[in-house]
Image (cartoon, rainbow, N blue to C red):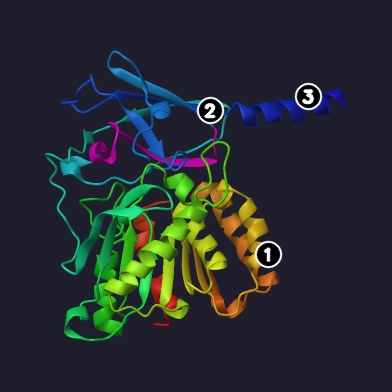
């Protein structure tokens, strides 16, 4: 029995003290060693650079030790903001780095080939001509903040008097424009322009930039490790401040049947919650790679609010995300909804075998999701 207890104790200690040390000792030739380097990722809200995640420096080597915050983390290194993130040749975007915690103590050596410099960048704007900035500093009174808001109008908007459905999206920097993205763009505008021409599917898209408070804003439930709960205030902002302004400014079909919300990762979590909390506002929900791990309160809330008759929800995850745990969580959530009153014909779930936690994955899957949600096969 003592031996058995020792094994259990040892296993628990391995989990509790699992950590990885990242060492950067190969940097661009023009790197300024007076500058600090930060690690930023899904474990801290993709902030771009928080003080607690600044690497220590020893001459021309940087290092940081990260404890096991979740099974697998996605991250990049920056010089303190997304204006200066690691990149490939000629300022090209690179995929997010990932690390899976599989041993108690690990060391990973990192090579960084280049830093993006927005003042010198060759990244060109890729937003279509029918994408505009609705407001650079739109006030969020519920959170006492401001945020940049993008708007996509259908190609035929100016030539008709029609009204259009509206899709709200999070992480606005990555929705339309390669020049503003920090992890690649979704190419939502190019995809919708094509669907407008081929299928007659026309939508207005409203994209809301994220901020340093991303983790808090995208969760209705507090997490002791990562941040407080501001998801209710964030959705209150969309529903009661932003949406009325959009409906007043543009020709929108403003009922729930014609209003969608979509996001990935933490944006998937808040979109899932938005559908269940505001089914009379959002009738179509796109949930990509949802971070249900952030708070398992989401399962209790879902069980109590799954009896929906008209809500349509589309779920997507990659089989490789979180060492497979994210797919398991999504499957559990979908089954929970079905067994607690959600109409089976109104829910769709998809697990992609080679899908990874990245904008490139979500970009590829956006068209299928939007066509299913809006019945355009």
Q: Within the image, what quadrant is residue 252 found in?
A: bottom left
- Mark 3 = which residue? 6
Q: What element carries label 1?
A: helix
The range drawn in magenta is 68-86
Q: Position of residue 11 (x, y in %)?
A: 70, 30
Q: Does the magenta stretch include residue 207?
A: no
Marks 1 and 3: which is nearer the front? Answer: 1
Residue in view at x 12 percent, y 46 percent: 122
Residue in view at x 57 percent, y 28 percent: 18
- Mark 1 = which residue? 304
Asked if residue 265 shows in the view, the reply is: no
Q: Which of pointers 3 and 2 lies earlier in the amino acid sequence? A: 3
Q: Is mark 3 on a helix, strand or loop?
A: helix
Check if mark 1's residue and mark 3's residue have beta carbons within 8 Å.
Answer: no
Asked if residue 68 shows in the view, the reply is: yes
Marks 3 and 2: which is nearer the front? Answer: 2
Quote the CA–CA distance across marks 3 and 2.
21 Å
Quote the CA–CA distance across marks 2 and 1.
37 Å
Left or right, residue 303 beside residue 167: right
Which one is nearer the viewer's eye here, 44 or 104? 44
């Amino acid at each position: 029995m003592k031996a058995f207890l020792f094994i259990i104790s040892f296993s628990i200690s391995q989990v509790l003290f699992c950590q990885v040390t990242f060492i950067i000792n190969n940097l661009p030739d023009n790197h300024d060693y007076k500058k600090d380097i930060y690690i930023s990722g899904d474990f801290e809200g993709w902030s771009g650079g928080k003080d607690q995640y600044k690497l220590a420096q020893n001459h021309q080597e940087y290092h940081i030790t990260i404890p096991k915050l979740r099974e697998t983390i996605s991250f990049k290194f920056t010089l303190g903001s997304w204006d200066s993130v690691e990149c490939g040749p000629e300022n090209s975007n690179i995929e997010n780095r990932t690390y899976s915690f599989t041993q108690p103590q690990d060391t990973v050596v990192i090579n960084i080939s280049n830093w993006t410099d927005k003042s010198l960048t060759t990244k060109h704007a890729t937003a279509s001509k029918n994408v505009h900035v609705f407001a650079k500093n739109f006030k969020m009174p519920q959170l006492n903040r401001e945020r940049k808001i993008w708007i996509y109008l259908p190609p035929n908007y100016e030539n008709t008097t029609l009204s259009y459905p509206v899709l709200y999206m999070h992480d606005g920097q990555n929705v339309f424009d390669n020049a503003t993205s920090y992890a690649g763009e979704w190419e939502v505008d190019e995809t919708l322009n094509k669907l407008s021409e081929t299928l007659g599917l026309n939508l207005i898209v409203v994209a809301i930039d994220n901020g340093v408070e991303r983790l808090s804003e995208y969760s209705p439930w507090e997490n002791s490790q990562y941040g407080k709960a501001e998801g209710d205030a964030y959705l209150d902002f969309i529903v009661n401040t932003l949406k009325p302004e959009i409906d007043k400014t543009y020709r929108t079909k403003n009922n729930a049947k014609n209003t969608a919300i979509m996001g990935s990762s933490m944006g998937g979590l808040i979109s899932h919650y938005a559908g269940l909390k505001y089914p009379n506002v959002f009738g179509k929900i796109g949930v990509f790679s949802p971070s249900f791990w952030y708070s398992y309160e989401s399962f209790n809330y879902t069980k109590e609010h799954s009896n929906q008759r008209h809500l349509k929800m589309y779920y997507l995850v990659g089989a490789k995300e979180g060492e497979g745990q994210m797919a398991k969580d999504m499957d559990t959530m979908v089954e929970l909804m079905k067994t607690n009153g959600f109409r089976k014909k109104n829910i769709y779930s998809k697990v992609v075998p080679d899908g990874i936690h990245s904008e490139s994955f979500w970009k590829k899957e956006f068209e299928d999701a939007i066509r299913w949600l809006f019945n355009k096969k």
